[in-house]
Amino acid sequence: MKKRLDSMELDFFLQQLITGLSNGMIIALIAIGYTMVYGIIELINFAHGDLFMLGSFLALTVLGVLGIDAWTGGGTWLGVLLLLLSSAAFCAGLNWSIERIAYRPLRASGKLSLLVSAIGASFILVNLGLFWGGLPLDVFAGGVAAAAPKDFPPLVPNTNLLGEDSLVQLTPKDLLVLGVTLPTMLALTWIVTRTRLGKAMRATAQNPVAARLMGIDTDRVIGATFLIGGALGGFASVIYALYNNTISFQMGYRAGMDAFTAAVLGGIGSMPGAVAGALVIGLVRAMSDGYLETRWTNTIVFGILVLILIFRPSGLLGSRAKEKV
Amino acid sequence: MNTLPTIVAAWLSLVIAAASSAQNGTIKIVSSLPRTGSANAQTGTIVNGIKMAIAEVGGKIDGYEIAYEDWDDASPQRGNWDPTVEAQNANKAVTDSSIVGYIGTFNSGAAKISMPELNRAGLVMISPANTYSGLTKPGLGEANEPAIYRPSGKISYFRVVPTDDLQGAVAAEFVAASGAKRVFVLHDRELYGKGIAEVFERRAKELGLQVSGMEGIDTKAANYKSLAQKVKFSKSDAAFFGGTTQTNAGQVAKDLRSAGFLGTLVVPDGCCEEAFIQAAGANNLEGNTFVTFGGLPPAELTGRGAQFRDGYRKMFDADPEAYAVYGYECARVLLDAIRRAASKDRAGVLQAVAQTKDFDGALGRWSFDANGDTTNRVMSINAVKDGKFVFVKRVGDAAAGGAAKGPETPSDAAAR
C-alpha cells in the first residue's frame, strides 16, 4: 500500500514537471522577442504580447479558410507546418512594420517616448484582435460574440503516448512544443553567434554609434531583430493555440506579462537567460498549482522575481549591468 | 443627398405624433447590462425581452408614453462589466427624474455598486439575472449584507431569478444523486462564483460527499493543466466550478477533460450560454458536463412562457437565450406596477412593485417576498448534446427539499 502511494506521488511530480516544461517553453519563445528588442534598443516592447495574440487569430483564420481539421490525416502535420509558417511570416512582417512606423521615428527622442509609443501600439493590436474575433467566420462561431474566447480545434491529438492506463500523460502536444522550441532556439543561437547578421546585431547592441562608424547599417539590423523576434512570437502563437486550444483577444496581456517577467528573471538582454527564466516560471507555476494552492501561484512567481532582483540585479544569466554612455 | 432631410422630417413627425398622443407625458425605464464583451449574447436577448414586453402594451400605459433606454455597463478594456461604468449609469439614472425603473444588473458584483445609489434615490431596481444570495438575504453573505445595500432602510431592489443558495444546493444534490463520493470544488474567486461554490461545498458535506479540495483559480491563466491533474490525482469522481464563461469556465472544462478527468462536471447558470460551449469545445462537454440554471430553458416553458417563446421567435426571428424570459418578466412586472401605481412617480412605482403578489408571469405564478426575492423556485439541470444545451430535469419545485425527490443520475441523462 505504501509503495503504491509513493509511485502515485512520483507520477504526480513527473506530470507537473511535463506540464511546467511545456508551459515554460511556450513562454520562452515569447520572452526571446522581448529580450532581443531590449538588448538592441533598450525598449520594453509592450506590443509584443498582443502581436503574439494576433498571430493565433491568423492561425485560426487560416485554419478555417483552408478547412484543415484533425481528420485531414497525415495532412494535419502539413497543416500545422503551414500554420507555423504563415503566423511566423505575419508576425514578423507586423513587428517589422510597427518598428518602422511607431518606433524608428522616435528612436532619437528618448526611451520614454518609445515606451509610450509601444503601449499605444499594444492598445491598437488588442482592439484589432477584438475586431478580428467579430468577423463572420465559422471558426469564430459566426463572430456573434467578438470578445468571447475562441475554441481552437485540436489538430494535435491529446492521446497519451505512455499508454492509456498510465496516470502520467505525455501527449503529442508536449512533443510539438519541444519539437518547435528546441530547433528554433538552436537556430537562433547559430544566427546570433555565427553569422554576419548576428555579429552586426551584437555590435549594434553594444554600441550603436560605433557600429554605424564601422559601416553597419544599424537601421537594417534593428529591423532584422524585429523580424526575428516577431517570427518567434508567431511560432509561439501557433503552439500556444494548439496546446491550450483556446484563444482570446485578451490573452496577449498575460502571456506578455509572463514572458516579460521571464526575460527580467533571466537577465534582460540575454537570450539563454530568457529561456532559463521562462522554464523557471513554467515549473514554479506548475509546482505551486500542484502542491500549494492556485491562488498563491502569482505571489510565488513574483516573489521569486523580487528576490532574484534584490540579490542578483542583472538576473539569472544576465551580464554585469554595464553603464551605457 | 436628400435622404438626411427626409429622415429628419420623418423622425420629427414621429416625435410630434408621439408627443400629441401622450397627453400625460413620458415615463422612462432603463436597463443597465454588459453589452460589450462575451455576455452580450445573453444580454442582447434580455433587451429583446424588455422591448417585447413594452411592445405588448403598445408602448403606452394610462396615456403615458413608455420610453426605454438600453445602457451598457461594460467597457471594451475589460470585455466585461466595469465598476466605473455601472457607477456612472446609477448616477445618470438617479439624476434623471423621468426614470421610474432600473432593470439590471446582469452581474451580482455590478449590483453591489448601483444598489445603494438607487436605494437612496428611491428608484426601483429589478434584476433579471443577479443570483448572489447576499444581495437580499440576511445571514448568507457578509455580516453587513444586505443592510449596506439599503441605506434608506427600505427595500428597493427586486429580482425574478432564484438565488445561489438554492442553485448551489441543487447542484450538490444532483452530484450526490449521481452516485459520486468525492468532489473537487473550484471557483473563480469572484462574488458570484465563490458564493455559489461555498453553498455547493456546504450542501455537499451535508449530503455526505467528501470534498477533496476547494480552490480559487487565476482567471487570466493560459491553462489549468496543473490544477486539472491535481483534480484527477485526487481520485475525485465529480467536480464543480463556480464561475462564468467570462471567468474562463471554458478553459477549466477543457483542461479537466484533456487531463483525463472523466467524472461529472457541474457548472452554474453563469455558464448557461452558447459562448460557454464555444469556449470549451462541444465535445469536451458531451455526456458528463451539466449546467444548473435558475429557471427553465425556453423550450420547457409552458403557458404564458410558451406564448413568450413563440412571440419572441416571431418578433426577432431567433430563439431566445436562457435569460431572455427574465428580461421580459422584469419589464412586465415593472409595467404592471406602473399601471397599478396611484402616482406614476418613483415612490408610487416602487410601492406597487413591492406589492406584487400572485403575478401571472411567463415563469408561472409568483410574488416578491419581504426581501425582494421571487417566490418562484423552479430550476433546471441541463446537459450539452450536439453543441447545444439540452434539458435534463426540472428541480427545486417544492420550497424545501423538493430537489432531492426522485433524482435522475447523470448517466441516465447522458443516455438520452
Image: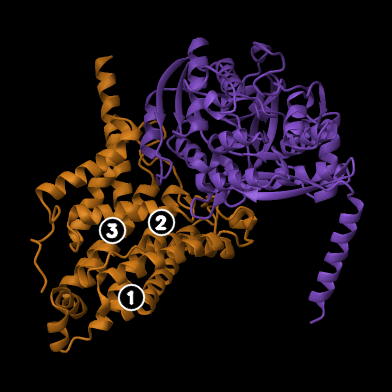
Chain colours: A orange, B purple
Q: Mark 2 and 1 residues: CB-CB less than 8 Å, in contact?
A: no
Tell me the chain of label 1: A
CA neighbours of label 2 inside 10 A, class few (<14), some (14 to 19), many (20+): many
Of residues A290 and B86, the one drawn nearer to the viewer in this rendering: B86
The residue pinned by badge 2 equals A252
- Mark 2 or 3, nearer chain start: 3
Q: Amino acid at mark 2?
A: Gly
Q: Left or right: B212 with respect to A131?
A: left
The answer to whether tags 2 and 3 share a subunit is: yes
Evaluate whether residue B264 shows in this view. Answer: no
Q: Amino acid at mark 1?
A: Tyr
- Mark 3 or 1, nearer chain start: 3
Tell me the chain of label 3: A
Q: Left or right: B155 with respect to B201?
A: right
Q: Which x, y percent locates residue B158?
A: 67, 29
Vertical arrangement, residue A71 with respect to residue B232, above or below:
below
C-alpha distance separating marks 3 and 1: 19 Å
Tag 2, which secondary structure? helix
The residue pinned by badge 1 equals A103
Q: Left or right: A142 with respect to B358?
A: left
Quadrant (top left/top right/bottom left/bottom right) for the N terminus of chain A: top left
Q: Mark 3 and 1 residues: CB-CB less than 8 Å, in contact?
A: no
The residue pinned by badge 3 equals A31
Q: Mark 2 and 3 residues: CB-CB less than 8 Å, in contact?
A: no
